[in-house]
């Protein structure tokens, strides 16, 4: 009884002692935030565990206890563990330095899941897993659940195209993913519901963190690429870097020559007083040459301050599509009405200059990230077509159609993000301003289509607030973003009031994450917007043939989007479910070009009704001896009504299923074999009906030599030539059918690295949303 009484008295004494909150921030050797570091308070003198947590994305942490006489221990993989005597509640900024003893080759063994939920992100650890041997950054991302990556374009299933960040810097050039080697990647974080600090148009974010580069001096990384699909394509990319103390200078030289084809059958059915049907058999080939270069200069004054500048040049001197020829047949009420043969070409040369300067620093507890950007670019589109047709009267006729189109873009942008620890959590705020000027010039020399001289000037300003804090095991993050855009539309230097607009939008975000045993749960909501590209807002009309034109739509409105997402992970199982509501969804439709001749189809984007859909992803990724499989099942169900030829609306609610099975085998002598399968069922998405089940099989073999300095990779994509798409687009009294052909592809990649230190460049860029619209 006496022992019980003593125990109760101790509890009462402990309960009346005030609990103290200890806060701080963890950074790496570059003074960058270090997330997911283990932060533990130990009692003195026995070093017994008191409480612990992990640092958040900004490196901040908060610990609460009513104990005193404490010792702080902070550790993270690849860094030396530090111990500090706790003197006051504000622990300040603690910097971890790389542990030289942990920098060699290691194999991570343990029961940690490959896919975890951390805050707002799905985190995939790459170090020590089979994903290190995936190949390029594209190859790596394609093996993540619910992700498709090809030639620098990354799509997250159920979200859309993602923005890519590499070590906190916005990826500007699609070739950067191919430049990145998977064995240099530490982890990948995928955010399906981006928070308030990201532009409201961003549908998803993929953050890539590489391993810490060591050493100084000169290094390079060269990649040579040979591909055969429609012809032989070659690519070479040379990356170099020189580092000495706080000075860092790097660059890239890139060149490619590629061949491509676009073979398909387009069928247009038009229901007027008579039934019209047009069948186009299109065979086109292209040759493209691209050259690009990048220079970056960075100086790190000390662990708290760094600044730098980056210049990029991209030039496409040759991008020519040849049509040889396109055969068309036109039927009226089932009878042959006209035959048409078209030959010609289209050239699209382009040039882009871009420049970025940045400052990144920490003043006391305040972290400051400033970026300023400029971009100047143009794209020309020159077209020359010769059309021969046999109308109903039986007399062959001929006409020539040639046009000139030039788009000129100017962008200036600045972005500021400030953050600091606050009330046991992390508070951040910032703003961004972007000015864009888009000039479009179109001339049709024969006068069949109207000329166009239009100009869009936009000023976009935004501001955001975001706060994140942990309450025990529960982590919460809330934010709000305000965006103001003024868009002025000009025709022949005269402002058009009806097509000039002003937008004011407020977008809230909120997310919660909580571990329940070994299961990690996350729930988030995001308000966002999808703005039309400048190309979709143009006025000019492009000529395909006598019965098919394509145009922009200056009256196109943005789509407002609300997303609710649930994530869960348990060991090697991952699940995501998402509900999305889109107001005034933008879809491609076909309409009559004019009342005088409604048989001419005009392809155009338009706002049509509201769209609701549910997406679900379930992924399994166990490791079985030398076999590492990853099975991903995906499901899409929408609720959307489509206008039909009979004047009624039909529910397009048939679901789409997707099946991906990736397999990696570790073979003797250091060989790595990939065997991947993909299948997508029929179903409906927006106003598009997928009429054919699509499947493909990909194979890859990789081998490294000379202590990972030299690697050779052979890949076969769509080996059985089975990835052919067949579907129909419904637009009222018009139905557009597409039968897209495909072809298998073989690729050989050779990469050599010498002392390939990575750039310290920390610029993140500004004006990215407007740049993507260009």
Image: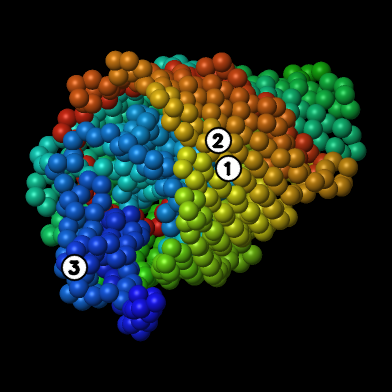
Contact, mark 1 vs mark 2 (Cβ under 8 Å): yes
Residue 138 lies, in percent from the top left, at 41, 34
Q: Give the residue number, with chain letter if any, for mark 3.
A: 44
Q: CA distance from mark 1 to mark 2?
A: 7 Å
Q: Secondary structure at mark 3?
A: loop
Q: Give the residue number, with chain letter if any, for mark 2.
A: 632
Q: Secondary structure at mark 1?
A: strand
Q: Residues within 10 Å of mark 1 (few under 14, many from 20)?
A: many
Q: Residues within 10 Å of mark 3 (few under 14, many from 20)?
A: few
Could you say which disc has been placed on residue 617 in the image?
1
Give the residue at x 83% y 48%.
649
Above or below for 714 versus 381: above
Taking the view exactly as shown, the residue that stands out farthest to the front is 1
Give the residue at x 28% y 62%.
49
Q: Secondary structure at mark 2?
A: strand
Horizontal relation, residue 155 to residue 590: left or right: left
Quadrant where the N terminus is found in the figure: bottom left
First in residue order: circle 1 vs circle 2:
1
Residue 164 lies, in percent from the top left, at 40, 47
Quarter of the image for residue 136 reads: top left
Taking the view exactly as shown, the residue that stands out farthest to the bottom is 16
């Amino acid at each position: 009884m006496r022992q019980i009484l003593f125990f109760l008295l101790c509890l009462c004494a402990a309960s009346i002692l005030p609990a103290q909150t200890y806060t701080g921030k963890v950074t790496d050797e570059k003074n960058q935030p270090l997330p997911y570091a283990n932060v533990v308070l130990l009692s003195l003198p026995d070093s017994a565990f008191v409480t612990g947590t992990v640092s958040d994305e900004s490196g901040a942490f908060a610990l609460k206890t009513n104990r005193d006489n404490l010792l702080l221990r902070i550790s993270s993989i690849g860094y030396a563990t530090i111990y500090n005597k706790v003197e006051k509640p504000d622990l300040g900024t603690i910097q971890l330095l790389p542990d030289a003893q942990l920098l060699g080759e290691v194999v991570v063994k343990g029961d940690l899941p490959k896919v975890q939920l951390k805050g707002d992100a799905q985190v995939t650890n790459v170090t020590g897993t089979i994903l290190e041997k995936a190949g390029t950054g594209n190859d790596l991302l394609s093996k993540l659940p619910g992700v498709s990556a090809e030639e620098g374009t990354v799509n997250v299933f159920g979200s859309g195209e993602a923005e890519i960040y590499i070590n906190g810097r916005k990826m500007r050039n699609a070739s950067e993913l191919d430049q990145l080697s998977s064995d240099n990647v530490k982890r990948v974080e995928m955010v399906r519901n981006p928070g308030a600090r990201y532009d409201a148009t961003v549908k998803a974010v993929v953050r890539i963190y590489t391993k810490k580069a060591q050493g100084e001096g000169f290094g390079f990384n060269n990649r040579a690429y040979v591909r055969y699909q429609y012809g032989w394509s070659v690519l070479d990319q040379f990356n170099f870097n020189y580092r000495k103390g706080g000075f860092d200078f790097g660059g890239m030289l890139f060149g490619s020559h590629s061949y491509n084809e676009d073979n398909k059958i387009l069928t247009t059915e038009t229901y007027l007083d008579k039934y019209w049907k047009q069948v186009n058999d299109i065979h086109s080939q292209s040759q493209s040459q691209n050259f690009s270069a990048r220079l970056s200069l960075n100086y790190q004054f000390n662990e708290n301050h760094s600044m730098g500048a980056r210049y990029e040049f991209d030039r496409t001197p040759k991008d020519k599509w040849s049509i040889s020829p396109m055969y068309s047949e036109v039927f009226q009420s089932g009878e042959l009405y006209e035959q048409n043969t078209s030959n010609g070409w289209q050239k699209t040369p382009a040039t882009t200059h871009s420049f970025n300067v940045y400052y990144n620093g920490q003043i006391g507890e305040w972290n400051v990230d400033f970026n300023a950007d400029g971009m100047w670019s143009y794209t020309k589109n020159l077209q020359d077509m010769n059309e021969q047709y046999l109308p109903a009267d039986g007399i062959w006729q001929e006409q020539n159609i040639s046009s000139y189109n030039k788009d000129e873009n100017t962008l200036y942008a600045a972005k500021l993000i400030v953050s600091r620890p606050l009330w046991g959590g992390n508070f951040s705020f910032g703003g961004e301003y972007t000015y864009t000027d888009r000039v479009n010039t179109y001339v049709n020399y024969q006068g069949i289509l109207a000329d166009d001289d239009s100009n869009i000037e936009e000023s976009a300003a935004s501001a955001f607030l975001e706060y994140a804090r942990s309450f025990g095991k529960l982590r919460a993050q809330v934010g709000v973003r305000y965006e103001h855009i003024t868009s002025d539309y000009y025709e022949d230097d005269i402002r058009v009031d009806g097509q000039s607009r002003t937008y004011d939008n407020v977008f809230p975000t909120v997310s919660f994450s909580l571990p329940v045993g070994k299961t990690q749960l996350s729930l988030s909501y995001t308000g966002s917007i999808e703005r039309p590209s400048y190309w979709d807002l143009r006025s000019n009309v492009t000529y395909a043939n006598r019965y098919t034109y394509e145009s922009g739509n200056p009256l196109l409105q943005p789509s407002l989007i609300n997303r609710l997402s649930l994530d869960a992970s348990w060991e090697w199982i991952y699940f995501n479910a998402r509900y999305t509501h889109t107001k005034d969804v933008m879809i491609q439709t076909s309409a009559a070009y004019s009342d005088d001749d409604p048989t001419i189809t005009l392809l155009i984007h338009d706002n049509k009704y509201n769209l609701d859909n549910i997406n679900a992803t379930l992924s399994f990724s166990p490791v079985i001896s030398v076999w590492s499989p990853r099975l991903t099942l995906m499901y899409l169900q929408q609720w959307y009504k489509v206008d039909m030829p009979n004047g009624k609306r039909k529910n397009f609610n048939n679901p789409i299923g997707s099946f991906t099975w990736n397999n990696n085998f570790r073979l003797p002598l250091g060989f790595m074999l990939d065997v991947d399968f993909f299948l997508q069922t029929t179903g409906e998405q927006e106003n598009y009906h997928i009429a054919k089940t699509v499947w493909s099989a990909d194979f890859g073999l990789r081998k490294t030599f000379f202590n990972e300095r030299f690697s050779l990779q052979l890949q076969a994509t769509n080996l059985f030539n089975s990835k052919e798409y067949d579907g129909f687009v419904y637009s009222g009294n018009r139905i557009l059918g597409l039968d897209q052909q495909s072809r298998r592809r073989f690729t050989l990649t050779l990469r050599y690295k010498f002392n390939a230190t990575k750039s310290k460049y920390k610029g993140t860029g500004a004006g990215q949303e407007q740049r993507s619209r260009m």
